[in-house]
Image (cartoon, helix red, strand yellow):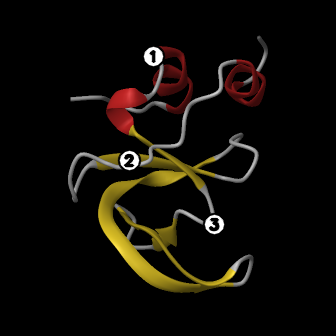
């Protein structure tokens, strides 16, 4: 497969229903999963007034770069659940 989007479309990753704990390392991707927005920590569920869905409670992710993104605005996955091919493509190190 030539790019990550094709891989992720072909090998759909389940969006986590629950994350093991807050501060779990996650990777946030754009809507079509072709761009890594950043790595960060899942901070639990928070109220967010999304421009897409309106007010709702959704996952809050504090990215390492200092930005906060919400699960309703991106595709996110625990780093430990990402396939090795995705980690290699985006330079994600799993410890």
Residue placed at 52% from the left, 84% from the top? 48
Circle on res. 73: 3
Compute the Cα span from label 3 to label 1.
24 Å
Whether the residues at callouts 2 and 1 have beta carbons within 8 Å, the answer is: no
Frontmost residue, 18 versus 32? 18
- Residue 14 horizontal side relative to residue 65, left or right: right
Residue 21: x and y, percent?
20, 52
In terms of depth relative to the viewer, which is nearer, 20 or 39? 20
Location of residue 53 in the rendering, given as x and y in whole percent from the top left corner: 71, 77
**What percent of the width, then of the height, locates residue 51?**
72, 83
Mark 3 or mark 1, which has the lower sequence index?
Answer: 3
| On-image quarter of the C terminus | top left
- In primary-sequence order, the first of circles 2 and 1 is 2
Q: State the separation of the CA atoms marked 2 and 1.
A: 14 Å
Give above or below for 61 relative to 94: below
- Give percent across and percent down for residue 17: 44, 47
| Residue at the image point whose x is 55% and y is 34% from the top | 14
Q: Secondary structure at mark 2?
A: strand
Q: CA distance from mark 2 to mark 3?
A: 14 Å
User: Which residue position holds label 1?
Assistant: 84
11 vs 30: above or below: above
Around disc 3, counting alpha carbons within 10 Å, would you say few (fewer than 14), some (14 to 19), or many (20 or more)?
Answer: some
Q: Residues within 10 Å of mark 1 (few under 14, many from 20)?
A: few
Quarter of the image containing the N terminus? top right
Residue 79, by quadrant, is top left
Marks 3, 1: nearer the viewer: 3
Label 1, secondary structure: give it. helix
Vertical order, 23 against 45 (above or below): above
* Element under disc 3: loop
Q: Is residue 68 above or below residue 16?
A: below
Residue bearing mark 2: 26
């Amino acid at each position: 497969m030539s790019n990550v989007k094709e891989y992720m479309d072909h090998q759909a990753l389940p969006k986590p229903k629950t994350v093991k704990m807050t501060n779990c390392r996650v990777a946030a991707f754009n809507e079509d999963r072709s761009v890594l927005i950043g790595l960060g920590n899942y901070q639990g569920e928070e109220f967010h007034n999304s421009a897409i869905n309106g007010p709702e409670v959704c996952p809050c992710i504090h990215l390492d770069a200092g930005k906060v993104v919400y699960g309703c605005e991106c595709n996110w996955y625990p780093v430990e659940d990402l396939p090795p091919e995705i980690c290699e493509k985006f330079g994600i190190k799993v410890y």
